[in-house]
Amino acid sequence: MTRIRPLLVVGAGLAGAQAAAGARRAGYDGRITIVGDEPHLPYQRPPLSKAVLRGQADAESTRLHEDSFYADNAVELVTGDRVLALDLETRRACLDTVVLATGASPRRLDVPGSRLSGVHYLRTVDDAVRLRDSITTSRRVAVVGAGWIGSEVTASARQLGLEVVLIDPAPTPLHRVLGTDVGSVFRQLHADHGVDLRLGVGVTELQSDGSVQKVVLTDGGVEPADVVVVAVGVLPRVELATAAGLAVGNAVIVDDRLQASVPGVYAAGDVADAWHPRYQRHLRVEHWATAFGQGAVAGANASGRSEPYTELPSFYSEQYDLGLAYVGHADPDDRFTVRGDLTERQFIGFFHRDGVVSAAMAVNMWDAVDDLKALVAAAQPTDPSRLEDPGTPVRELTAKHR
């Protein structure tokens, strides 16, 4: 009689919870255990820098499932504990399968004073609650890092009426992902909402008299702040995978089925560097949609299926009255073509190479999102001049409509 293999999910975030759900949907009826080091039920992170931080939603509203979901689906959930090591030799002997959904940790600011009281990172729901409590009595907030988290925290703090200074070495917010043209849109957006922008400079020191009071910049400038939010990126939590002997590069290296270098071990979400059939390369994507989708596929495959993960990377950001939807993956040297008016903050942007659109974004143009997804997925060449022509519907941009 064939023994049904137990499934261990390491990490109780979005990808981990989705792995358990995906296994059950795939018909797996063996034992499932999720182990997470936070004391909370699995929850979603995107609201933390927006509604939760602004006090418009409470922490419980971020939960991915109702409390009863885990009992109803016979999922054993262990919270507030950690898996210290994986013995893959023993695992093979016991025929267990494993999904690694350990996520990522905030990259730390390594300057004098970085451990002072008043310095915050935003990764967990507890981080969001602590930051929310701190900024309600703050006089001036300094946000170090103008990526997605830093930009969204900045917008939320300004919407709460706080003075905010946004600091980043790049010339515009979101420069690494969106480039100069669209980054300039966000620079003007924050300026229009009263943010003090200190761009093109870094941080050399945080100063205090017990709690943080000043941020010293690389150009010699000093910015007062009694709350500092550090948002300079994340690092995938690969310690377990490395110690277990799995292949690790930018993160845990997995194939298009999300299986790691040892059969029966899968990875999903922020910790996975997954082969993507559309781009014919490994990609590590740090956004909600990827954790959600990869988690479900990894769980299904760990339970016996063999399905490729083919969903395009995508994400959404809300800052003030601007909403951006992005789909695909662009390289820094891709060409950029815009349709619409950047100054009006209502446009479509295309990243492309040799006429093939690798990624696209819609800013305050929601009716275009589905067509943009189809365009990027098609991976067919089009005349670049048609990309900027508003008279050509996006759905007609692929080669068969030329």
Image (spheres, rainbow, N blue to C red):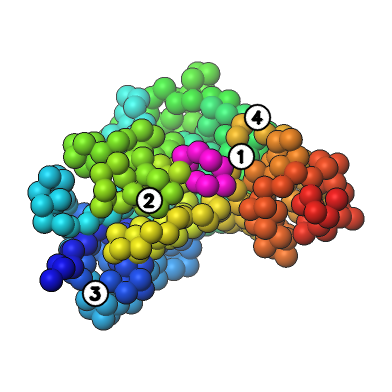
Disc assigned to residue 29: 3
Residue 222, horizontal then vertical, whole percent: 48, 26
Magenta span: 276-283
Q: Residue at x 52, y 33 (%)?
A: 167
Q: Residue at x 81, y 41 (%)?
A: 384
Q: Position of residue 116 (x, y in %)?
A: 29, 35
Residue wearing tag 2: 258
Q: Amino acid at mark 3?
A: Asp
Is 278 covered by the magenta stretch? yes
Rounded to the nearest angstrom, the CA distance separating label 4 from label 2 is: 28 Å
Q: CA distance from mark 2 to mark 3?
A: 21 Å
Residue type indicated by callout 4: Asp
Determine whether label 4 and label 2 are within 8 Å by CB.
Answer: no
Residue most extreme to the front: 1
Structural distance between the alpha carbons of marks 3 and 4: 48 Å
- Identify which residue is drawn at 63% across, 53% down: 377
Q: Residue beneath label 4, please?
A: 333
Q: Is residue 344 left or right of residue 198?
A: right
- Which tag, 4 or 2, sits closer to the chain's start? 2
Residue 77 rendering spot, x and y as whole percentages: 20, 67
- In space, the residues marked 1 and 3 are separated at their CA atoms by 40 Å
Mark 2 neighbour class, 10 Å CA radius: few under 14, some 14 to 19, many 20 or more: many
Verify whether residue 94 appears in magenta. Answer: no
Local secondary structure at mark 2: loop
- The mark nearer the N terminus, 2 or 3, is 3
Please state which amino acid type lies under the numbered disc 1.
Ala
Q: Sequence order check: which comes first, mark 2 or mark 1?
A: 2
Q: Mark 3–mark 4 contact, CB under 8 Å? A: no
Q: Which residue is mark 1?
A: 330
Separation (CA) of disc 4 from disc 1: 8 Å
